[in-house]
Image (cartoon, coloured by chain):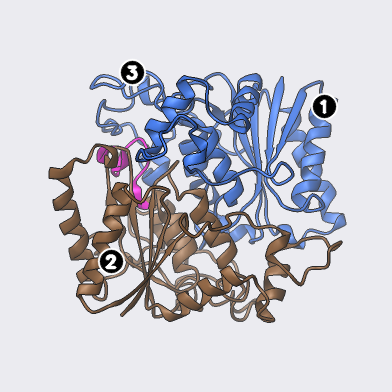
Chain colours: A blue, B brown
């Protein structure tokens, strides 16, 4: 397999940095090809602005989807974005690795998504009509590829449990796993999450590292989160609402979008 | 009231920009004091890095919470961050206004949160022990103040409905409303959301503007989302898990953290 790891931590000597090295070494030991986008090291530009759209007339009103579509179609998006496109098309698997800041990714990684996931590339793909609302949620540019998150959280695991005060980790990560990764077609694997990351000492590191190595060894075989396909029959089109009766007896909120017939969610 | 509006759109001539002007004018007409942080116009720095922590020794490993705490305590965080602190302490109400990009805020606004919400200011406040896990979720620096989101979404409303394929809007915004705003103590009002924002024409604008004016007129009186207080007795401490039996019959996921005895959620 070919793997792209996008890394978003400002300190290479961090736990997040140490775990990146563990992941990359294990993937290479398994014979995978690995490339890393180190956003801080590369000085990644985080903010979407006019400079992202070279074809936009200087006095034209910036409409981001239209501008993104125009420059994507003519191959004139900025070089840094086009390099990331090439890496994403090269890779069979995408790993996003980041510390959980305010219950989601750091700004620099959000800026990678905002700028790289262009119209015509990651959204606005396929037919949009009354019969079909695009190739998304299980279809799209990255269909057949896999993605997963490696997340380090400062908080304590029980606070992220099913009844924990922060909210369940799977729900907190749903806007990323379902909304950013599944949307353009990735099969999304259960996330690898380390809790109490600031308190992990040397003795605690090795078991975590071994757990991560195991996830890297099974990257090609781990069952993905069973999100429902938009165009697979479970949703009414065009309203996008789940057909009545499909959900499990206790499902509501984000859990509606999991196929209850598939039981495996998080193996660890 | 004094109101701080944080605005995060790269195009002042956008719908988001027009709605900002509507909100500011109505607030001023009501006699409120208004200040605006226009992140794009101000060239806001989005990424947390070493330059944010002037006291950090050049060869020291950057641990973000510790570095944030140290420079906050000595009043040596960067000028741009300290200006935002002063505005936040000045304001009785905080409004975050942004286009929904990939189901959350744009990177520049996430970077405002990542940098401004310092340790000792927005988190790491109060006693942390086996008896108490800090002043957060209903307590903290911003207790007694109000906050709300003004969001423009390109997508279609049914896709964000209770059974919609994107996930329910209240759940998608939970990591922001609960995790970013309620966490440091704000009472969080139901969000103002405009759907199909890219398709709104002039005829469609005025009803939306009037709906927003009404929300601005009722900013001081709208009932907040009834999130449960961490230290109000509903959660076990220190595990942070909701006590058994408190949830409504049909609640799971994020909905567990709403007080079912309070029925009002979104008035619009």
Determine if residue B145 is in view: yes
Residue identified by numbered label 3 = A127
Q: How far across and how far down the image is residue B128, in percent?
A: 64, 77
Which circle's residue, 3 or 1, is located before the other in the chain?
Answer: 1
Q: Residues within 10 Å of mark 2 (few under 14, many from 20)?
A: many
Q: How far across and how far down the image is residue B164, in percent?
A: 31, 38
Q: Quadrant of the C terminus of chain B?
A: bottom left
* Residue shown at 36% from the left, 54% from the top: B251
Q: Chain of mark 3?
A: A
Q: Quadrant of the N terminus of chain B?
A: bottom left
Q: Where on the picture, by quarter, is residue A229?
A: top left
Residue situated in front as seen by the camera: A83 or A244: A83
Please state which of the two labelled residues, at mark 3 or mark 2, is closer to the viewer.
Answer: 2
Q: Are marks 1 and 2 on the same chain?
A: no
Span highlighted in magenta in the image: B156-170
Q: Where on the picture, by quarter, is residue B188?
A: bottom left
Residue situated in front as seen by the camera: A37 or A208: A37
Quote the CA–CA distance across marks 3 and 1: 39 Å
Q: Chain of mark 2?
A: B
Residue identified by numbered label 1 = A28
Q: Please state if B38 lies on the left or on the right of B191 as rendered.
A: right
Give the prevailing secondary structure in the magenta stretch: loop
Mark 3 vs 1: CB contact within 8 A: no
Q: How far across and how far down the image is residue A80, in percent?
A: 63, 33
Q: Chain of mark 1?
A: A
Residue identified by numbered label 2 = B24
Does B111 appear in magenta? Answer: no
* Residue shown at 20% from the left, 70% from the top: B217
Quote the CA–CA distance across marks 1 and 2: 55 Å
């Amino acid at each position: 397999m070919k793997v792209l790891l996008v890394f978003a931590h400002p300190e290479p000597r961090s736990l997040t940095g140490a775990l990146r090295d563990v992941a990359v070494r294990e993937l290479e030991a398994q014979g995978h090809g690995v490339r890393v986008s180190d956003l801080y090291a590369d000085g990644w530009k985080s903010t979407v602005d006019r400079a992202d759209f070279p074809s936009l007339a200087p006095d034209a009103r910036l409409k981001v989807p239209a501008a993104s579509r125009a420059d994507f179609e003519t191959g004139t998006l900025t070089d840094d974005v086009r390099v990331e496109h090439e890496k994403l098309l090269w890779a069979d698997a995408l790993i996003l690795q980041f510390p959980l800041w305010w219950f989601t990714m750091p700004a620099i990684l959000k800026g990678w998504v905002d700028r790289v996931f262009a119209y015509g590339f990651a959204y606005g793909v396929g037919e949009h009509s009354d019969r079909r609302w695009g190739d998304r949620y299980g279809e799209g540019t990255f269909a057949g590829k896999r993605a997963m998150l490696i997340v380090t959280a400062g908080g304590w695991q029980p606070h992220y449990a099913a009844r924990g005060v922060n909210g369940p980790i799977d729900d907190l990560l749903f806007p990323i796993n379902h909304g950013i990764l599944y949307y353009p077609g990735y099969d999304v694997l259960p996330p690898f999450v380390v809790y109490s990351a600031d308190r992990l000492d040397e003795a605690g590191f090795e078991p975590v590292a071994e757990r991560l190595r195991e996830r890297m060894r099974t990257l090609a075989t781990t069952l993905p989160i069973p999100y429902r396909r938009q165009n697979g029959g479970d949703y009414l089109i065009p309203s996008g609402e789940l057909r009545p009766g499909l959900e499990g007896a206790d499902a509501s909120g984000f859990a509606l979008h999991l196929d209850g017939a598939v039981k495996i969610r998080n193996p660890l």
